[in-house]
Image (cartoon, rainbow, N blue to C red):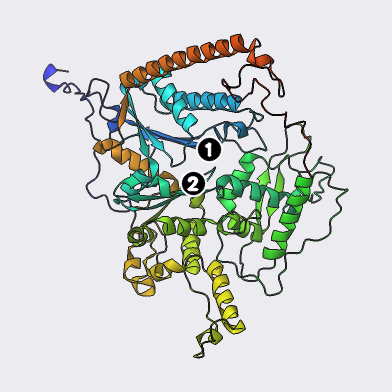
Amino acid sequence: MSSSSAAPPATYTTPTKRAGFSSTATAEAGPSRARPAGASPAYSSRRHSLYGIEDRIVIDPGSRTWKVGFSGEPEPRSVFWSTPSSGEDETEAWSLDPSLISSARGDRAEGDRLAGISVLRNLRKAFFECLMTDPKARKVIVLENTFLPRYVKEHIAQALFDSLKVPSVAFTPSSVLALAACGRITGLVVDCGWLETTVTPVYHSRPLYHLARSTALAGRALHRRLRRLLNHHATYYPPPASLGNLARQPVKPVPTGLLTDQLIERILTEGCFVGGVFVPRADETDEDEAMDVDAVQEKAEVEARREADRLARRYADDSSSSAKDMRFSVTPSSGSKAMGTGTLVVPGWLRERASEILFGDAVDEDESIPGLILACVLKCPIDLRAPMLSNILVTGGTSSLPNWITRLRVSILQSLLPPPSDPSEHSGAVPPFGTPEARGKETREWRRRGDEPYKALYGLAGKVVILNDPAPLSGDAQGAGASRGGSAPRWTTGLMSWVGGSLAGALKTSGPEIMREEYDMLVSESLARGEVWYEASDAALAEVAATAGLDLEEMRPGMAMQGLEAQRKRGWDEGRVLGDWTRATALV
Protein backbone atom coordinates (compact mmCIF):
# COMPACT_ATOMS: atom_id res chain seq x y z
CA MET A 1 0.00 0.00 0.00
CA SER A 2 1.32 3.43 -0.87
CA SER A 3 2.22 5.97 1.70
CA SER A 4 -0.39 8.40 0.31
CA SER A 5 -3.25 6.10 1.34
CA ALA A 6 -1.96 5.57 4.88
CA ALA A 7 -4.24 6.65 7.75
CA PRO A 8 -3.35 9.95 9.39
CA PRO A 9 -1.58 9.65 12.72
CA ALA A 10 -3.80 9.74 15.79
CA THR A 11 -3.77 12.91 17.83
CA TYR A 12 -4.04 12.99 21.62
CA THR A 13 -5.15 16.01 23.61
CA THR A 14 -4.88 16.74 27.28
CA PRO A 15 -8.27 16.86 29.02
CA THR A 16 -9.43 20.38 29.76
CA LYS A 17 -10.25 21.79 33.17
CA ARG A 18 -14.00 21.43 32.84
CA ALA A 19 -15.99 18.52 31.50
CA GLY A 20 -18.49 18.99 28.72
CA PHE A 21 -21.71 19.49 30.68
CA SER A 22 -24.81 19.59 28.55
CA SER A 23 -26.35 23.00 28.08
CA THR A 24 -29.80 21.46 28.29
CA ALA A 25 -29.47 20.57 31.97
CA THR A 26 -32.66 21.23 33.88
CA ALA A 27 -33.72 21.52 37.48
CA GLU A 28 -34.08 17.77 37.59
CA ALA A 29 -30.32 17.48 38.06
CA GLY A 30 -29.32 15.53 41.11
CA PRO A 31 -27.47 12.48 42.36
CA SER A 32 -29.58 10.19 40.18
CA ARG A 33 -28.48 11.95 36.99
CA ALA A 34 -25.88 10.17 34.90
CA ARG A 35 -22.36 11.53 35.14
CA PRO A 36 -21.55 13.77 32.11
CA ALA A 37 -19.30 12.33 29.45
CA GLY A 38 -15.68 13.40 29.27
CA ALA A 39 -12.83 13.65 31.68
CA SER A 40 -13.58 14.76 35.23
CA PRO A 41 -12.42 18.27 36.04
CA ALA A 42 -10.76 16.88 39.15
CA TYR A 43 -8.17 14.95 37.13
CA SER A 44 -6.99 17.79 34.93
CA SER A 45 -3.23 18.01 34.42
CA ARG A 46 -3.29 21.81 34.33
CA ARG A 47 -1.99 23.35 37.55
CA HIS A 48 -3.34 26.67 38.76
CA SER A 49 -1.50 27.26 42.01
CA LEU A 50 1.63 26.36 43.90
CA TYR A 51 -0.07 23.57 45.84
CA GLY A 52 -2.08 21.86 43.11
CA ILE A 53 -5.01 22.20 40.81
CA GLU A 54 -7.94 24.42 41.49
CA ASP A 55 -10.43 21.73 42.52
CA ARG A 56 -10.43 20.93 46.21
CA ILE A 57 -11.26 17.90 48.28
CA VAL A 58 -14.63 18.21 50.02
CA ILE A 59 -15.01 16.01 53.12
CA ASP A 60 -18.21 15.62 55.12
CA PRO A 61 -17.06 13.69 58.22
CA GLY A 62 -19.80 12.04 60.21
CA SER A 63 -19.80 9.81 63.24
CA ARG A 64 -21.63 7.21 61.13
CA THR A 65 -20.78 7.83 57.45
CA TRP A 66 -18.23 9.89 55.53
CA LYS A 67 -18.77 11.56 52.15
CA VAL A 68 -15.73 12.58 50.09
CA GLY A 69 -15.30 13.98 46.60
CA PHE A 70 -14.00 16.84 44.48
CA SER A 71 -15.37 20.35 44.34
CA GLY A 72 -17.33 21.27 41.25
CA GLU A 73 -18.93 17.84 40.96
CA PRO A 74 -22.64 17.15 41.53
CA GLU A 75 -22.18 14.23 43.93
CA PRO A 76 -19.48 12.74 46.16
CA ARG A 77 -17.12 10.16 44.72
CA SER A 78 -17.52 7.84 47.70
CA VAL A 79 -19.74 7.36 50.74
CA PHE A 80 -18.45 4.85 53.30
CA TRP A 81 -18.99 3.80 56.90
CA SER A 82 -16.86 5.58 59.46
CA THR A 83 -16.02 2.35 61.29
CA PRO A 84 -16.34 -1.33 60.35
CA SER A 85 -19.42 -2.92 61.86
CA SER A 86 -18.83 -5.01 64.94
CA GLY A 87 -22.07 -7.00 64.93
CA GLU A 88 -24.97 -6.21 67.24
CA ASP A 89 -23.89 -2.81 68.59
CA GLU A 90 -24.14 0.42 66.65
CA THR A 91 -20.84 1.70 65.32
CA GLU A 92 -19.71 5.30 65.30
CA ALA A 93 -16.29 6.86 64.95
CA TRP A 94 -16.80 9.23 67.88
CA SER A 95 -19.34 10.35 70.43
CA LEU A 96 -20.14 13.66 72.08
CA ASP A 97 -18.43 12.27 75.19
CA PRO A 98 -15.17 10.37 74.48
CA SER A 99 -15.83 8.00 77.36
CA LEU A 100 -19.02 6.75 75.62
CA ILE A 101 -17.18 5.44 72.57
CA SER A 102 -17.45 1.68 72.28
CA SER A 103 -14.26 -0.07 73.43
CA ALA A 104 -13.29 3.00 75.52
CA ARG A 105 -14.91 1.47 78.64
CA GLY A 106 -15.60 4.82 80.24
CA ASP A 107 -12.05 6.15 79.85
CA ARG A 108 -12.01 9.59 78.23
CA ALA A 109 -8.32 9.36 77.30
CA GLU A 110 -8.84 6.00 75.62
CA GLY A 111 -11.91 7.29 73.81
CA ASP A 112 -9.95 10.29 72.54
CA ARG A 113 -7.21 7.99 71.27
CA LEU A 114 -9.68 5.69 69.50
CA ALA A 115 -11.38 8.67 67.85
CA GLY A 116 -8.01 9.87 66.55
CA ILE A 117 -7.27 6.44 65.09
CA SER A 118 -10.66 6.33 63.32
CA VAL A 119 -10.22 9.82 61.89
CA LEU A 120 -6.75 9.05 60.52
CA ARG A 121 -7.90 5.74 59.03
CA ASN A 122 -10.88 7.36 57.29
CA LEU A 123 -8.80 10.21 55.89
CA ARG A 124 -6.22 7.79 54.49
CA LYS A 125 -9.01 5.75 52.94
CA ALA A 126 -10.56 8.88 51.42
CA PHE A 127 -7.35 10.06 49.74
CA PHE A 128 -5.66 6.82 48.75
CA GLU A 129 -8.55 4.40 48.10
CA CYS A 130 -11.59 6.49 47.19
CA LEU A 131 -10.13 9.56 45.46
CA MET A 132 -6.69 8.17 44.53
CA THR A 133 -5.03 11.58 44.68
CA ASP A 134 -1.95 13.09 46.27
CA PRO A 135 -2.95 14.91 49.48
CA LYS A 136 0.08 17.21 49.24
CA ALA A 137 -1.39 18.79 46.09
CA ARG A 138 -4.95 19.30 47.29
CA LYS A 139 -6.58 21.91 49.44
CA VAL A 140 -9.31 20.53 51.69
CA ILE A 141 -12.75 21.77 52.73
CA VAL A 142 -14.11 20.08 55.86
CA LEU A 143 -17.81 20.41 56.67
CA GLU A 144 -18.18 21.29 60.34
CA ASN A 145 -21.39 20.35 62.09
CA THR A 146 -22.93 22.75 64.60
CA PHE A 147 -21.95 20.71 67.65
CA LEU A 148 -18.93 18.87 66.30
CA PRO A 149 -16.80 17.94 69.34
CA ARG A 150 -13.67 20.00 69.72
CA TYR A 151 -11.41 17.00 70.14
CA VAL A 152 -12.66 15.53 66.83
CA LYS A 153 -11.89 18.77 65.02
CA GLU A 154 -8.37 18.77 66.46
CA HIS A 155 -7.84 15.15 65.35
CA ILE A 156 -8.97 16.01 61.82
CA ALA A 157 -6.59 18.98 61.59
CA GLN A 158 -3.70 16.99 63.05
CA ALA A 159 -4.20 14.08 60.65
CA LEU A 160 -4.51 16.34 57.59
CA PHE A 161 -1.50 18.51 58.37
CA ASP A 162 0.90 16.19 60.18
CA SER A 163 0.19 12.87 58.47
CA LEU A 164 -1.16 13.74 55.01
CA LYS A 165 0.68 17.08 54.59
CA VAL A 166 -2.18 18.91 52.90
CA PRO A 167 -1.43 22.57 52.03
CA SER A 168 -4.53 24.08 53.69
CA VAL A 169 -7.77 23.19 55.45
CA ALA A 170 -10.97 25.23 55.60
CA PHE A 171 -13.53 24.29 58.26
CA THR A 172 -16.88 25.55 56.97
CA PRO A 173 -20.26 25.35 58.78
CA SER A 174 -22.41 22.65 57.22
CA SER A 175 -25.58 24.68 57.86
CA VAL A 176 -24.32 27.55 55.69
CA LEU A 177 -23.27 25.16 52.91
CA ALA A 178 -26.64 23.38 52.94
CA LEU A 179 -28.43 26.70 52.42
CA ALA A 180 -25.92 27.66 49.72
CA ALA A 181 -26.87 24.52 47.79
CA CYS A 182 -30.44 25.88 47.70
CA GLY A 183 -29.45 29.42 46.78
CA ARG A 184 -30.30 30.82 50.23
CA ILE A 185 -28.32 32.78 52.78
CA THR A 186 -30.98 32.89 55.52
CA GLY A 187 -32.91 29.97 56.91
CA LEU A 188 -33.39 27.37 59.62
CA VAL A 189 -31.35 24.21 59.03
CA VAL A 190 -32.63 21.00 60.64
CA ASP A 191 -29.89 18.36 60.54
CA CYS A 192 -31.12 14.92 61.63
CA GLY A 193 -27.99 12.78 61.73
CA TRP A 194 -26.82 9.79 63.74
CA LEU A 195 -25.85 11.08 67.18
CA GLU A 196 -28.16 14.08 67.44
CA THR A 197 -30.59 16.34 65.65
CA THR A 198 -29.51 19.99 65.52
CA VAL A 199 -31.53 23.08 64.62
CA THR A 200 -29.34 26.01 63.57
CA PRO A 201 -30.61 29.45 62.51
CA VAL A 202 -28.53 31.09 59.79
CA TYR A 203 -28.85 34.79 59.00
CA HIS A 204 -27.00 36.20 55.98
CA SER A 205 -24.62 33.22 55.90
CA ARG A 206 -23.76 33.58 59.59
CA PRO A 207 -24.77 30.69 61.86
CA LEU A 208 -26.36 31.89 65.10
CA TYR A 209 -24.75 29.29 67.32
CA HIS A 210 -26.05 30.84 70.55
CA LEU A 211 -29.60 30.12 69.36
CA ALA A 212 -28.97 26.57 68.11
CA ARG A 213 -30.71 23.63 69.77
CA SER A 214 -30.05 19.89 69.76
CA THR A 215 -31.64 16.64 70.90
CA ALA A 216 -30.52 13.03 71.10
CA LEU A 217 -33.56 11.92 69.05
CA ALA A 218 -31.75 10.97 65.85
CA GLY A 219 -30.57 7.93 63.92
CA ARG A 220 -29.05 6.08 66.88
CA ALA A 221 -32.23 6.43 68.95
CA LEU A 222 -34.27 5.19 65.98
CA HIS A 223 -31.98 2.18 65.52
CA ARG A 224 -32.31 1.23 69.17
CA ARG A 225 -36.10 1.58 69.07
CA LEU A 226 -36.30 -0.56 65.93
CA ARG A 227 -34.02 -3.25 67.38
CA ARG A 228 -36.12 -3.41 70.54
CA LEU A 229 -39.38 -3.74 68.60
CA LEU A 230 -37.97 -6.39 66.27
CA ASN A 231 -36.71 -8.39 69.22
CA HIS A 232 -40.14 -8.59 70.87
CA HIS A 233 -42.69 -8.34 68.03
CA ALA A 234 -41.08 -9.67 64.85
CA THR A 235 -41.19 -13.37 63.94
CA TYR A 236 -38.19 -15.39 62.83
CA TYR A 237 -38.42 -18.59 60.77
CA PRO A 238 -35.05 -20.40 60.91
CA PRO A 239 -33.82 -22.38 57.88
CA PRO A 240 -34.36 -26.15 57.81
CA ALA A 241 -31.94 -28.15 59.88
CA SER A 242 -31.55 -30.87 57.22
CA LEU A 243 -33.13 -32.25 54.07
CA GLY A 244 -35.01 -34.84 56.12
CA ASN A 245 -36.54 -32.19 58.36
CA LEU A 246 -37.90 -29.24 56.39
CA ALA A 247 -40.17 -27.96 59.13
CA ARG A 248 -39.68 -24.30 60.04
CA GLN A 249 -41.10 -23.41 63.41
CA PRO A 250 -41.51 -19.70 64.21
CA VAL A 251 -39.21 -18.29 66.86
CA LYS A 252 -40.38 -15.44 69.08
CA PRO A 253 -38.78 -13.36 70.53
CA VAL A 254 -36.16 -13.01 67.85
CA PRO A 255 -32.65 -13.92 69.03
CA THR A 256 -30.63 -10.79 69.63
CA GLY A 257 -27.62 -12.30 67.84
CA LEU A 258 -29.49 -12.13 64.53
CA LEU A 259 -30.31 -8.42 64.87
CA THR A 260 -26.96 -7.16 63.67
CA ASP A 261 -26.24 -3.59 62.78
CA GLN A 262 -26.31 -4.38 59.07
CA LEU A 263 -29.73 -6.05 59.32
CA ILE A 264 -31.21 -3.14 61.29
CA GLU A 265 -29.90 -0.69 58.71
CA ARG A 266 -31.30 -2.80 55.88
CA ILE A 267 -34.76 -3.05 57.44
CA LEU A 268 -34.79 0.67 58.17
CA THR A 269 -33.79 1.74 54.66
CA GLU A 270 -35.81 -0.85 52.71
CA GLY A 271 -38.92 -1.37 54.80
CA CYS A 272 -39.60 1.52 57.18
CA PHE A 273 -41.40 4.77 56.50
CA VAL A 274 -42.99 7.57 58.49
CA GLY A 275 -46.74 7.36 59.03
CA GLY A 276 -49.22 10.16 59.42
CA VAL A 277 -50.08 11.88 62.67
CA PHE A 278 -51.38 9.22 65.05
CA VAL A 279 -54.70 9.89 66.75
CA PRO A 280 -54.93 7.81 69.96
CA ARG A 281 -58.10 5.96 70.82
CA ALA A 282 -60.39 7.31 73.51
CA ASP A 283 -60.05 4.17 75.64
CA GLU A 284 -56.26 3.99 75.35
CA THR A 285 -54.34 3.65 78.61
CA ASP A 286 -50.64 3.51 79.46
CA GLU A 287 -50.94 0.96 82.23
CA ASP A 288 -48.21 -1.66 82.15
CA GLU A 289 -49.20 -5.30 82.24
CA ALA A 290 -47.89 -7.53 85.01
CA MET A 291 -44.66 -9.24 84.10
CA ASP A 292 -42.73 -12.16 85.55
CA VAL A 293 -39.66 -10.34 86.81
CA ASP A 294 -38.02 -13.61 87.83
CA ALA A 295 -37.91 -14.68 84.18
CA VAL A 296 -36.10 -11.51 83.19
CA GLN A 297 -33.32 -10.71 85.60
CA GLU A 298 -31.99 -7.53 84.12
CA LYS A 299 -33.88 -4.32 84.85
CA ALA A 300 -33.02 -2.91 81.41
CA GLU A 301 -34.65 -5.93 79.74
CA VAL A 302 -37.77 -5.45 81.84
CA GLU A 303 -38.04 -1.79 80.83
CA ALA A 304 -37.42 -2.66 77.17
CA ARG A 305 -40.16 -5.30 77.27
CA ARG A 306 -42.62 -2.88 78.84
CA GLU A 307 -41.88 -0.22 76.26
CA ALA A 308 -42.27 -2.68 73.38
CA ASP A 309 -45.60 -3.90 74.77
CA ARG A 310 -46.82 -0.33 75.23
CA LEU A 311 -46.03 0.50 71.62
CA ALA A 312 -47.74 -2.67 70.40
CA ARG A 313 -50.92 -1.85 72.33
CA ARG A 314 -50.82 1.66 70.96
CA TYR A 315 -50.17 1.04 67.26
CA ALA A 316 -50.89 -2.61 66.42
CA ASP A 317 -54.68 -2.14 66.25
CA ASP A 318 -54.61 1.09 64.26
CA SER A 319 -57.42 0.73 61.73
CA SER A 320 -56.19 3.65 59.63
CA SER A 321 -52.89 1.93 58.81
CA SER A 322 -52.56 0.06 55.52
CA ALA A 323 -48.96 -1.12 55.97
CA LYS A 324 -48.41 -4.81 55.26
CA ASP A 325 -46.02 -7.26 56.82
CA MET A 326 -42.65 -7.51 55.10
CA ARG A 327 -40.22 -10.42 54.89
CA PHE A 328 -36.43 -10.19 55.01
CA SER A 329 -33.95 -12.98 54.40
CA VAL A 330 -31.51 -13.47 57.26
CA THR A 331 -28.23 -15.35 57.06
CA PRO A 332 -27.69 -17.46 60.20
CA SER A 333 -24.48 -17.23 62.17
CA SER A 334 -21.36 -18.89 60.83
CA GLY A 335 -21.45 -21.61 63.49
CA SER A 336 -24.98 -22.71 62.59
CA LYS A 337 -25.47 -26.02 60.74
CA ALA A 338 -28.81 -24.99 59.22
CA MET A 339 -29.33 -25.03 55.46
CA GLY A 340 -30.11 -21.86 53.52
CA THR A 341 -31.28 -18.58 54.97
CA GLY A 342 -33.91 -17.74 57.54
CA THR A 343 -36.86 -15.37 57.19
CA LEU A 344 -37.68 -12.43 59.43
CA VAL A 345 -41.30 -11.20 59.28
CA VAL A 346 -41.66 -7.54 60.25
CA PRO A 347 -45.21 -6.41 61.14
CA GLY A 348 -46.66 -3.56 59.12
CA TRP A 349 -47.40 -1.36 62.14
CA LEU A 350 -43.78 -1.70 63.21
CA ARG A 351 -42.53 -0.51 59.81
CA GLU A 352 -44.80 2.52 59.99
CA ARG A 353 -44.54 3.55 63.64
CA ALA A 354 -40.93 2.82 64.59
CA SER A 355 -40.02 6.42 63.71
CA GLU A 356 -42.59 7.87 66.13
CA ILE A 357 -39.76 8.26 68.63
CA LEU A 358 -38.61 11.29 66.62
CA PHE A 359 -42.02 12.97 66.82
CA GLY A 360 -42.80 12.96 70.52
CA ASP A 361 -43.24 9.30 71.50
CA ALA A 362 -40.02 8.91 73.49
CA VAL A 363 -40.30 7.25 76.90
CA ASP A 364 -37.71 9.54 78.52
CA GLU A 365 -39.76 12.62 77.50
CA ASP A 366 -37.15 14.12 75.21
CA GLU A 367 -38.31 17.11 73.22
CA SER A 368 -39.62 16.07 69.82
CA ILE A 369 -38.06 17.40 66.63
CA PRO A 370 -41.08 19.64 65.76
CA GLY A 371 -41.03 21.00 69.31
CA LEU A 372 -37.28 21.58 69.06
CA ILE A 373 -37.76 23.62 65.87
CA LEU A 374 -40.46 25.81 67.40
CA ALA A 375 -38.45 26.27 70.60
CA CYS A 376 -35.49 27.43 68.51
CA VAL A 377 -37.70 29.90 66.64
CA LEU A 378 -39.00 31.25 69.94
CA LYS A 379 -35.42 32.00 71.01
CA CYS A 380 -34.80 34.02 67.86
CA PRO A 381 -35.43 37.79 67.81
CA ILE A 382 -38.98 38.63 66.85
CA ASP A 383 -37.89 40.06 63.49
CA LEU A 384 -36.19 36.78 62.51
CA ARG A 385 -39.04 34.40 63.35
CA ALA A 386 -40.92 34.82 60.08
CA PRO A 387 -37.81 34.44 57.84
CA MET A 388 -36.77 31.34 59.76
CA LEU A 389 -40.15 29.63 59.49
CA SER A 390 -40.33 30.56 55.80
CA ASN A 391 -36.96 28.95 54.98
CA ILE A 392 -36.75 25.62 56.81
CA LEU A 393 -34.24 23.22 55.25
CA VAL A 394 -34.03 19.57 56.30
CA THR A 395 -30.71 17.73 55.98
CA GLY A 396 -29.17 14.55 57.36
CA GLY A 397 -29.40 10.90 56.46
CA THR A 398 -32.11 9.97 58.99
CA SER A 399 -34.55 12.41 57.37
CA SER A 400 -34.31 10.43 54.10
CA LEU A 401 -37.07 8.11 55.29
CA PRO A 402 -40.18 8.28 53.09
CA ASN A 403 -42.76 10.85 54.28
CA TRP A 404 -40.36 12.23 56.94
CA ILE A 405 -40.46 15.85 55.74
CA THR A 406 -44.20 15.81 55.12
CA ARG A 407 -44.83 14.50 58.64
CA LEU A 408 -42.56 17.20 60.03
CA ARG A 409 -44.55 19.93 58.28
CA VAL A 410 -47.87 18.54 59.48
CA SER A 411 -46.58 18.23 63.07
CA ILE A 412 -45.33 21.83 63.07
CA LEU A 413 -48.65 23.13 61.76
CA GLN A 414 -50.52 21.04 64.29
CA SER A 415 -48.47 22.57 67.11
CA LEU A 416 -49.32 26.06 65.84
CA LEU A 417 -53.08 25.50 65.97
CA PRO A 418 -54.74 27.20 68.97
CA PRO A 419 -56.69 24.82 71.23
CA PRO A 420 -60.48 24.95 71.17
CA SER A 421 -61.79 27.75 73.35
CA ASP A 422 -64.16 27.28 76.24
CA PRO A 423 -67.49 29.07 75.66
CA SER A 424 -67.76 29.89 79.36
CA GLU A 425 -64.59 31.96 79.13
CA HIS A 426 -66.24 34.37 76.67
CA SER A 427 -69.27 35.16 78.81
CA GLY A 428 -69.98 38.81 79.25
CA ALA A 429 -70.06 38.72 83.05
CA VAL A 430 -66.72 39.56 84.70
CA PRO A 431 -66.42 38.22 88.23
CA PRO A 432 -65.51 40.81 90.88
CA PHE A 433 -61.89 41.03 91.92
CA GLY A 434 -60.95 38.85 94.85
CA THR A 435 -63.94 36.54 94.59
CA PRO A 436 -63.54 32.76 94.24
CA GLU A 437 -64.78 33.01 90.64
CA ALA A 438 -62.08 35.55 89.77
CA ARG A 439 -59.38 33.48 91.41
CA GLY A 440 -60.58 30.37 89.57
CA LYS A 441 -60.48 32.18 86.21
CA GLU A 442 -56.97 33.45 86.93
CA THR A 443 -55.84 29.94 87.84
CA ARG A 444 -57.27 28.49 84.61
CA GLU A 445 -55.49 31.15 82.55
CA TRP A 446 -52.21 30.46 84.34
CA ARG A 447 -52.52 26.71 83.69
CA ARG A 448 -53.32 27.35 80.04
CA ARG A 449 -49.90 28.98 79.62
CA GLY A 450 -48.27 25.56 79.88
CA ASP A 451 -50.75 24.08 77.43
CA GLU A 452 -49.89 26.70 74.80
CA PRO A 453 -46.08 26.99 74.76
CA TYR A 454 -46.07 28.29 71.16
CA LYS A 455 -48.84 30.85 71.49
CA ALA A 456 -46.50 33.62 70.32
CA LEU A 457 -46.10 31.79 66.98
CA TYR A 458 -49.76 31.16 66.19
CA GLY A 459 -49.87 34.11 63.80
CA LEU A 460 -46.96 32.70 61.77
CA ALA A 461 -48.60 29.37 60.92
CA GLY A 462 -49.25 30.57 57.36
CA LYS A 463 -45.55 31.26 56.79
CA VAL A 464 -44.24 27.74 57.52
CA VAL A 465 -42.34 26.60 54.42
CA ILE A 466 -39.93 23.67 54.07
CA LEU A 467 -37.66 24.33 51.12
CA ASN A 468 -37.12 20.68 50.20
CA ASP A 469 -40.66 19.53 50.90
CA PRO A 470 -41.50 16.83 48.30
CA ALA A 471 -45.26 17.53 48.58
CA PRO A 472 -45.69 21.21 49.47
CA LEU A 473 -49.04 22.80 50.11
CA SER A 474 -50.48 25.13 47.52
CA GLY A 475 -50.52 28.87 48.12
CA ASP A 476 -54.29 28.95 48.57
CA ALA A 477 -54.21 26.23 51.23
CA GLN A 478 -51.69 27.81 53.57
CA GLY A 479 -50.95 31.33 52.40
CA ALA A 480 -49.14 33.12 49.64
CA GLY A 481 -45.70 32.05 50.84
CA ALA A 482 -46.52 28.34 50.94
CA SER A 483 -46.07 28.03 47.19
CA ARG A 484 -42.29 28.35 47.72
CA GLY A 485 -42.21 24.99 49.48
CA GLY A 486 -40.24 22.39 47.60
CA SER A 487 -38.29 25.00 45.64
CA ALA A 488 -34.92 23.58 46.67
CA PRO A 489 -32.99 21.39 44.20
CA ARG A 490 -33.91 17.75 44.35
CA TRP A 491 -30.88 16.47 46.21
CA THR A 492 -31.36 13.86 48.89
CA THR A 493 -31.23 15.29 52.38
CA GLY A 494 -28.05 13.38 53.18
CA LEU A 495 -26.14 15.05 50.30
CA MET A 496 -27.38 18.62 50.72
CA SER A 497 -24.44 19.83 52.83
CA TRP A 498 -21.82 18.10 50.67
CA VAL A 499 -23.24 19.65 47.50
CA GLY A 500 -22.97 23.05 49.15
CA GLY A 501 -19.33 22.31 49.98
CA SER A 502 -18.68 21.33 46.37
CA LEU A 503 -20.24 24.59 45.21
CA ALA A 504 -18.22 26.59 47.74
CA GLY A 505 -14.99 24.95 46.58
CA ALA A 506 -15.75 25.76 42.96
CA LEU A 507 -16.61 29.39 43.77
CA LYS A 508 -13.80 29.87 46.33
CA THR A 509 -16.28 30.93 49.01
CA SER A 510 -15.47 28.45 51.79
CA GLY A 511 -14.52 29.35 55.33
CA PRO A 512 -11.16 30.86 56.34
CA GLU A 513 -8.26 28.65 55.32
CA ILE A 514 -5.63 27.42 57.75
CA MET A 515 -2.33 27.06 55.95
CA ARG A 516 0.13 24.34 56.90
CA GLU A 517 2.75 26.89 57.96
CA GLU A 518 0.22 28.66 60.17
CA TYR A 519 -0.79 25.38 61.77
CA ASP A 520 2.84 24.44 62.48
CA MET A 521 3.39 27.83 64.11
CA LEU A 522 0.29 27.42 66.30
CA VAL A 523 1.44 23.97 67.39
CA SER A 524 4.91 25.31 68.28
CA GLU A 525 3.38 28.12 70.34
CA SER A 526 1.11 25.67 72.12
CA LEU A 527 4.03 23.39 72.98
CA ALA A 528 6.02 26.35 74.29
CA ARG A 529 3.13 27.42 76.53
CA GLY A 530 2.84 23.85 77.77
CA GLU A 531 6.51 23.70 78.73
CA VAL A 532 6.22 26.98 80.62
CA TRP A 533 3.12 25.74 82.45
CA TYR A 534 4.79 22.45 83.43
CA GLU A 535 7.85 24.28 84.72
CA ALA A 536 5.69 26.64 86.80
CA SER A 537 3.65 23.70 88.12
CA ASP A 538 6.76 21.75 89.12
CA ALA A 539 8.21 24.84 90.83
CA ALA A 540 4.97 25.36 92.77
CA LEU A 541 4.91 21.73 93.86
CA ALA A 542 8.52 21.90 94.98
CA GLU A 543 7.81 25.09 96.96
CA VAL A 544 4.82 23.58 98.72
CA ALA A 545 6.69 20.33 99.46
CA ALA A 546 9.67 22.24 100.88
CA THR A 547 7.43 24.37 103.11
CA ALA A 548 5.17 21.55 104.30
CA GLY A 549 7.88 18.95 104.64
CA LEU A 550 5.69 16.45 102.81
CA ASP A 551 4.99 15.76 99.15
CA LEU A 552 1.49 16.64 97.94
CA GLU A 553 0.96 13.13 96.57
CA GLU A 554 1.48 11.71 100.07
CA MET A 555 -1.12 13.95 101.73
CA ARG A 556 -4.53 12.60 102.59
CA PRO A 557 -7.79 14.29 103.66
CA GLY A 558 -7.60 15.44 107.25
CA MET A 559 -3.79 15.79 107.38
CA ALA A 560 -2.73 19.19 108.73
CA MET A 561 0.44 20.90 109.92
CA GLN A 562 1.13 24.24 111.57
CA GLY A 563 2.64 27.28 109.84
CA LEU A 564 0.86 27.44 106.48
CA GLU A 565 -2.44 29.16 107.38
CA ALA A 566 -1.62 32.07 105.04
CA GLN A 567 -0.26 29.90 102.20
CA ARG A 568 -3.17 27.62 101.34
CA LYS A 569 -2.68 26.11 97.90
CA ARG A 570 -4.46 23.58 95.70
CA GLY A 571 -7.43 23.30 97.99
CA TRP A 572 -5.73 21.62 100.93
CA ASP A 573 -5.23 23.20 104.37
CA GLU A 574 -1.82 22.94 106.01
CA GLY A 575 -2.86 24.33 109.39
CA ARG A 576 -5.68 23.17 111.60
CA VAL A 577 -7.69 26.39 111.61
CA LEU A 578 -11.01 24.63 112.18
CA GLY A 579 -11.85 21.17 113.22
CA ASP A 580 -11.98 18.44 110.60
CA TRP A 581 -15.54 18.65 109.27
CA THR A 582 -15.47 14.98 108.33
CA ARG A 583 -15.27 14.05 112.00
CA ALA A 584 -17.46 16.79 113.40
CA THR A 585 -20.74 16.04 115.18
CA ALA A 586 -23.83 17.69 113.82
CA LEU A 587 -25.58 20.08 116.19
CA VAL A 588 -29.18 19.11 116.96
Q: Left or right of 35: which side holds 341?
A: right
- Quick check: 23 left or right of 101? left
- The residue at the point 32 percent across, 63 percent down is 484
- Can you identify the residue that label 1 sits on? 64
SS type, badge 2: loop
Image location (x, y in percent) of residue 218: 55, 48
Q: Do the residues labelled 1 and 2 touch (CB within 8 Å)?
A: yes
Q: Residue at x 61, y 21 (%)?
A: 565
Q: How crowded is mark 1: few (under 14 residues within 10 Å), some or many (20 or more)?
A: many
What secondary structure is marked by label 1?
Answer: loop
Q: Can residue 373 be seen in this view?
A: yes
Q: Residue at x 23, y 34 (%)?
A: 18
Q: Which residue is the site of mark 2?
A: 397
Q: Say what amino acid the circle numbered 1 marks.
A: Arg
Image quarter for residue 379?
Answer: bottom left
First in sequence: mark 1 vs mark 2: 1
Q: Quadrant of the C terminus?
A: top right
Residue 37 appears in the picture as rendered: no
Q: Observer-nearest residue: 426 or 324?
A: 426
